[in-house]
Image (spheres, rainbow, N blue to C red):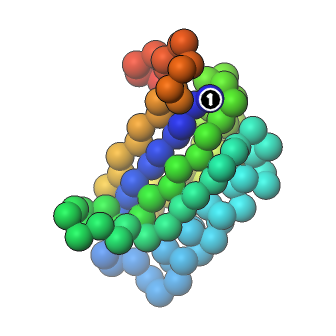
Amino acid sequence: MITHMLVFRFRDDLPPGAAESVLAELETFPSRYPAMRNWRSGVNVSTRDTSMTHGFVVEFPTEQDLLDYLHSDSHERFVRERWRPVIERQAIVSLPTAGDAQPIERGHR
């Protein structure tokens, strides 16, 4: 199992409704990408670090399932057309669940 996590901050100068529209589209991902498991998303409620405003966590059965999702035409289009124009900062981490033998090779996106 591979856990894929992304934390992010929307740009401050977005038009009304832009962030909500992107968040609503993200919530459709588990139904669009059948390999996704245990999708969780929400607003950052940390009082220790508020540099990121939102995040999500999802699991994939295998590294190949994650890579298939990341390199799919629909994901690439979403990132290019919807994500990048509204995101100020982001951090992405993908890691094998404890006990999995093969970690993801560095450099995969």
Q: Residue at x 66, y 50 (%)?
A: 38
| Left or right: 19, with 40 as reference point | left
Between residue 82 and residue 7, name the one nearer to us. 7
The part of the image, by quadrant, that contains residue 84 is bottom left
Q: Position of residue 51 (x, y in %)?
A: 24, 62
Q: Position of residue 81 (x, y in %)?
A: 56, 56
Q: Residue at x 53, y 29 (%)?
A: 97
Q: Residue at x 63, y 71 (%)?
A: 24
Instruction: Judge whether residue 87 can be spotted in this image.
Output: no
| Left or right: 80, with 92 as reference point | right
Mark 1 closeness class: few <14, some 14–19, many ≥20 residues within 10 Å: many
Q: Which quadrant does the N terminus fall into?
A: top right
Q: Residue at x 78, y 51 (%)?
A: 32
SS label for mark 1: loop
Q: Residue furthest top?
A: 101
Q: How many marks?
A: 1
| Left or right: 8, with 108 as reference point | left
Q: Residue furthest front?
A: 99
Q: Residue furthest left?
A: 48
Q: Residue furthest bottom?
A: 16
Between residue 78 and residue 45, name the one nearer to us. 45
Which residue is under mark 1? 1
The part of the image, by quadrant, that contains residue 7 is bottom left
Q: Position of residue 54 (x, y in %)?
A: 42, 64
**Above or below for 47 versus 77:** below
What residue type is disc 1 on?
Answer: Met
**Above or below for 13 versus 102:** below
Q: Position of residue 41 (x, y in %)?
A: 54, 62
Instruction: Judge whether residue 50 can be spotted in this image.
Output: yes
**Above or below for 91 versus 88:** above
